[in-house]
Amino acid sequence: MTALVVELHGFKVDQLYIESREAALNKSDISTVARARQTVLPKGAVFRADHVHGHVEPLLWISDIVAGAVHAHRKGDPQYTALLGDALLDFEVPTDC
């Protein structure tokens, strides 16, 4: 999440909508974004995150589609990322998964 905040801020994004899940996970998301804003982004940077239920905001589904396309590409099937063309920005984010 921290890497995502940094990347988005670099593109002048100041609002992130995250699909709502369990209360504890939502709280963790907000804490991570707040910590990134305080420790990684420039002082005084504006960046906000809010949770939205998937059934309320269908555009949240786009991230699942893009993730599926990138996953397929990494498994050897680039047909879906080819459809996304230059609209796709793919960057590595280290995780503990």
Image (cartoon, rainbow, N blue to C red):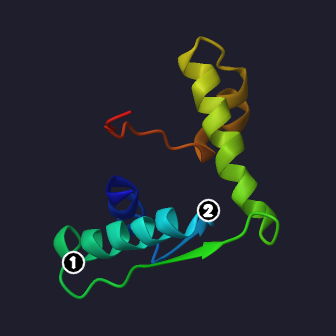
Image quadrant holding the C terminus, namely top left
Give the numbered dot on residue 38.
1
State whether residue 20 is above or below residue 69: below
- The residue located at (64%, 50%) in the rendering is 63
- The residue located at (49%, 62%) in the rendering is 25
Q: Position of residue 5 (x, y in %)?
A: 38, 63
Counting every numbered tag in the picture gives 2
Q: Position of residue 7 (x, y in %)?
A: 37, 57
**What amino acid is labelled 2 in the image?**
Arg
Q: Are marks 1 and 2 in contact (CB under 8 Å)?
A: no
- The residue located at (71%, 51%) in the rendering is 62
Q: Nearer the viewer, mark 1 or mark 2?
A: 2
**What amino acid is labelled 1 in the image?**
Gln
Quarter assignment of residue 9: bottom left
Mark 2 neighbour class, 10 Å CA radius: few under 14, some 14 to 19, many 20 or more: few
State whether residue 76 is above or below residue 11: above
- Horizontally, residue 34 falls left or right of residue 66, namely left
- The residue located at (63%, 66%) in the rendering is 20
> Most extreme residue toward the bottom, as rendered?
44
- Horizontally, residue 90 falls left or right of residue 80, namely left
State whether residue 54 is above or below residue 82: below
Q: Position of residue 89 (x, y in %)?
A: 50, 44
Which comes sooner in the sequence, label 1 or label 2? 2
Determine whether the residue tagged by mark 2 lies in a helix, strand or loop.
loop
Residue identified by numbered label 2: 21
Mark 1 neighbour class, 10 Å CA radius: few under 14, some 14 to 19, many 20 or more: few
> Most extreme residue toward the top, as rendered?
76
Quarter assignment of residue 55: bottom right
- Horizontally, residue 60 falls left or right of residue 3, namely right
